[in-house]
Amino acid sequence: MLYQMHEFGRAWMAPVTYWADASAKMFGASGSWLSNLPGAARAAAGYELLYRIGKDYEKPEFGIHSLDIDGDIFPVIEREMARKPFCRLLRFKRYTDDAGNLKELKDDPPVLVVAPLSGHHATLLRDTVRTLLRDHKVYITDWIDARMVPTAEGDFTLDDYVAYIQEFIRQIGANDLHVISVCQPTVPVLAAISLMAQKGEATPRSMVMMGGPIDTRQSPTAVNNLATEKPLWWFQNTVIHPVPANYPGHGRQVYPGFLQHMGFMAMNPERHAQSHWDFYQDLLKGDLDDADSHRRFYDEYNAVLDMPAEYYLDTIRVVFQEHLLPKGEWDVDGTRVDPSAITGTALLTIEGELDDISGQGQTRAAHDLCTGIAKDDTHHIEVKGAGHYGIFSGRRWRTQVYPKVRDFIARYST
């Protein structure tokens, strides 16, 4: 009933948020007579804050239509290369304008970015994609909100996740491909490539693993502790709920996005409260740049998706509670995962010094498992002063991390 109650509350709040949005515009628009009334600026700021707190946040667009490289503008086109019930494979094509004719740049190495299926949409990696596009052909997994997937499509498990990654690698072509996994997908990506190697299939030229929970026994964080303090049945009975009747996935068991969002906010409630107060103050002062930065951040941060229950519970059990991958005890579709079978794929792991989601050593643990890779082809980067998001988004990603990732990929592209 919790999900249904949430939907009822959201429907009840909808007229209030629409009214708040309209009021903010009426009191804030320069051409409105209401904007000349005493206290109009304060009313407009208060109404907009109310609107943004109460509104429903839809999935944002990637919105990457062009790329500025040293003053030259390159058009970018987003294409859907494959569609599975729970995921789309997207391709971002960068073009050059030669005498008015768009021509695709074909010599750049292809990169598959495996986005996390852990609450937020793949658009959280917008900065990652935009930066990689400077020197690469970029593909990304765009996971579909489970509430939008009809129950006729069946369940989605962690084993299915691994199978999806293998299928995308084969479709793009493993021989020239480099795979970048960010956070949660480091585990299924390592499993996918390991199983391909065990079958004698071609594997990607390199894999870059960023801030992922390969072995959560290393430097456990608050996120890790939450997953281990409660038994699996607690998660099943507490956070898993059926999708209400107003969505295509009616009846599907999911970990609802709104519950995940509550968890995100609860991790730093004071910081989020202060951020909203600062937004209100920026509106009063007319500091539109800072106010717009707040809007962009929370448009992304507040947009969450439902996760399939089977996949979520598998991840809690396999990754966080039983540590099956680092212990060498993980079976995927009846086959034991053996990372030591990987021999022709270079490995780069990246960790943030201040990462409070995947602690230090959790990603680097991949080196202890991938013993078949030559030592000269294994590399590790610790990003000083960086938290979890700083290793794949923002200034540190663009200026400190990306140049090393670019050079690593280039080294194994020839």
Image (cartoon, rainbow, N blue to C red):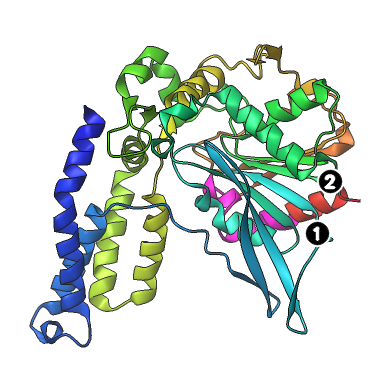
Q: Is residue 52 inside the magenta stretch?
A: no
**Is residue 361 visible from the viewing direction of this image?**
no
Above or below residue 213? Residue 124 is below
Instruction: Answer left or right for 41 relative to 286.
Output: left
Image quadrant assignment for residue 289: bottom left
Query: Which stretch did the figure color magenta?
Result: 385-404
SS state under label 2: helix
Residue position marked by numbered label 2 in the rendering: 176
Give the residue displayed 81% in from the left and 62% down from the top: 106
Residue 215 x/y as whole percent? 61, 24
Residue at 48%, 58% in the rendered image = 61
Toward the left, the furthest residue is 38
Q: Would residue 85 appear left or right of 258 to someone viewing this image? A: right
- Does the stretch in magenta take in 386? yes
Could you tell me what secondary structure mostly forms the magenta stretch? helix
SS of the residue under disc 1: loop
Give the percent coordinates (x, y) of residue 244. 28, 33
Residue found farthest to the right: 414
Q: Which mark is residue 108?
A: 1
**Quarter of the image holding residue 202?**
top right
Placement of the N terminus among the 4 image quadrants? top left
